Each structure stands twice: as structure tokens, then as C-alpha cells.
Amino acid sequence: MSTGIVITNDTELHQRIMKLNYLKEEQELVIKRNVREVVYSMHPSMIFKNIVSKFSADKESTNDLKSIGLNLGKDFLIAKLFGKGGSIKGFISSLLIRKATDYVLNNHSDLIATGIHKVESFFKEKISNKENEAESAE
């Protein structure tokens, strides 16, 4: 440590130790804050939110994201409800359901989006009503 500080007595040594401990605590707080910020930014919901905000500026990208999300949800539900086609019956039923859902998604995706927004607003309204009731009860 060649910091240029010369300690000549016990008092100066204790002052230097206290100063270094203070600096150490400040640096630890900065590191903890930086780690929290990194962890927060790496949370899946924040990653998804950042990605969506980047794509939401472009209307075509927004529509592509909606269709990708609907297709992923459709495939997930088909796989859960009808299996992965392990039998002939499962394969045929999943194929028919996939064709039917493709038709509905391609021809009526606006109705599906409207329905999703209505359900979302219904739940938001319920939550806000509960919050208002809780505030008025206090």
C-alpha cells in the first residue's frame, strides 16, 4: 500500500482504520445496490416487459407478438388437453383441434383480443373495488 499516508502514532492509526472501515461500508452499500439492480433487471417479468416495450413501438411487431403468443398458448392447451399424440385417437383429435383453433385464430383474432381485454379489465375493476372498499373501511 503506497498511498503516501504516513502514520506516526497510535491515534493516526485508529483514525485511518475508522476511515477505511467507513469507506468499506460505503463500497459495500454501492455493491449491494448494484447487485439488486442487476437481479431486478434479470427477473423474467422485467426481461419480458423490456422486450415488449421495444417491440410495442412497431404495430406490425405487436401483431406478430400477439399471434406468436396465441399460437404458443394454443399449442400448450392442445398438448395438455389431448396429449402429445401418443395414440391414433390422440393424434387425430389434436390435429382436428389444431385446425379448428387455427381457423378461429386466423379469422377471429380481434374477437379473442377483445375478450382478453374485457376479462383483464373485469379483474382490474374487481381489484380496484376491493382496494376502494379497504380504504373506505379504514
Image (spheres, rainbow, N blue to C red):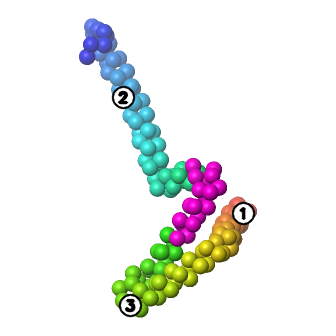
- Identify the disc placed on residue 117: none
Q: Which residue is mark 3?
A: 88
Q: Secondary structure at mark 3?
A: helix
Q: Secondary structure at mark 2?
A: helix
Q: Residues within 10 Å of mark 1 (few under 14, many from 20)?
A: few
Q: Which residue is mark 2?
A: 24
Quadrant the C terminus occupies: bottom right
Residue 83 falls in image quadrant: bottom left
At a point 41% along the width and 92% down the height, the residue shown is 89
The prevailing secondary structure element of the residues shown in magenta is helix
**Could you say which is closer to the camera, residue 9 or residue 82?**
82
- Viewed as shown, does residue 136 lie left or right of 22? right
In this rendering, the label closer to the viewer, 3 or 2? 3
The answer to whether residue 70 is magenta is yes
Where residue 108 sits: x, y (%)?
Answer: 66, 75
Q: Is residue 57 above or below residue 73?
A: above
The answer to whether residue 57 is magenta is yes
Residue 102 falls in image quadrant: bottom right
Q: Given the image, on which type of amino acid does mark 3 rest?
A: Ile
Quadrant the N terminus occupies: top left
Where residue 40 sits: x, y (%)?
Answer: 47, 48
Q: Secondary structure at mark 1?
A: helix
**Is the Cβ of the residue at disc 3 closer than 8 Å to that at disc 1?**
no
Q: Given the image, on which type of amino acid does mark 1 rest?
A: Asn
